[in-house]
Amino acid sequence: MVPDPSLPLELGFIALVAAVAVAIVALVHRARGPSGSVAIGMAVYLAAYYGLGASGLIDDAAPPKPLLLLVPALTTSLWFALRSRAGEALAVRAPIAALVGLHVFRLPLELLMHAWSREGALPPQMTFAGQNWDIVTGALALVLAPFAARSRTAVLIWNIVGLALLLNIVTVAITSIPGPLRLFMNDPPNLLVMRAPYIWLPTFLVQVALAGHILVFRALRRAQVLP
């Protein structure tokens, strides 16, 4: 049985999710996008996934249950970044510094994940002590954001590196889940993210990171940095 993290770590995670959600709504509002619709949509989305995690239906992660996490979440994040009015507003009117700065949340997230692992709730390969170096993306976003408008080339390099690191940890996470794709056989298995509220890690925070990278690429392309 994979234990839940301690209460302070759980509350810290919930606070981080709330802060990211508020930041997205504020950023859409600043870009003169449909911030009200985004706020309502995110509230419904987060509640739906919380309910799925709290129901216990996917606790064992038996195939194809993990698809309930990945497919709807990935579809939603790609739609938001590429097709939604909010995504268009962000790509066109949001300051590039704000789009980069949004990724700073990945720094405290990695610190939380490391603490979860120390409590035996998350496999060590999913932390910066193992195979997950996504903390670099958050740290660099913190440093780069104030200067993002001055060096679009630096933003492009950071965005490529950040996307690669995101894909790396997603791969590590998938291959740490019990099932036919599992490569990391150590304990604990990656089951914490199948439960509420930690289900918001793959279904919300990871999707925010992915959509955020896509939006940065779109913003750079509109600035004619990319061909």
Image (cartoon, rainbow, N blue to C red):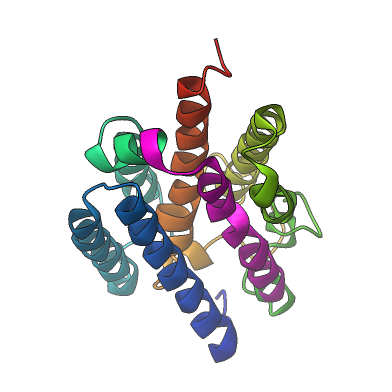
Image quarter hosting the N terminus: bottom right
Q: Main secondary structure of the magenta part?
A: helix
Q: Is residue 97 visible?
A: yes
Rendered location of residue 110, percent (x, y)? 67, 63
Asked if the magenta segment contains residue 108, the reply would be yes
Relative height, residue 204 to residue 7 (above, below): above
Farthest bottom residue in view:
7
Q: Name the residue rendered at 61%, 51% in the picture.
A: 176
Stretch of the chain drawn in magenta:
92-115
Farthest front residue in view:
150
Rendered location of residue 76, percent (x, y)? 30, 42
Q: Name the residue rendered at 66%, 35% in the picture.
A: 155
Question: Is residue 61 found left or right of 216 in the rendered image?
Answer: left
Rendered location of residue 44, percent (x, y)? 20, 63
Relative height, residue 208 to residue 40 (above, below): above
Choose between 181 and 123: the one closer to the eye. Answer: 123
Relative height, residue 209 to residue 35 (above, below): above
Q: Is residue 4 visible?
A: no
Choose between 76 and 6: the one closer to the eye. Answer: 76
Question: Is residue 23 found left or right of 28 in the rendered image?
Answer: right
Q: Name the residue rendered at 25%, 68% in the picture.
A: 47
Q: Quadrant of residue 36?
A: bottom left
Asked if the magenta segment contains residue 110, the reply would be yes
Farthest right residue in view:
129
Rendered location of residue 69, percent (x, y)? 37, 51
Image quarter hosting the C terminus: top right
Number of labels in the image equals 0
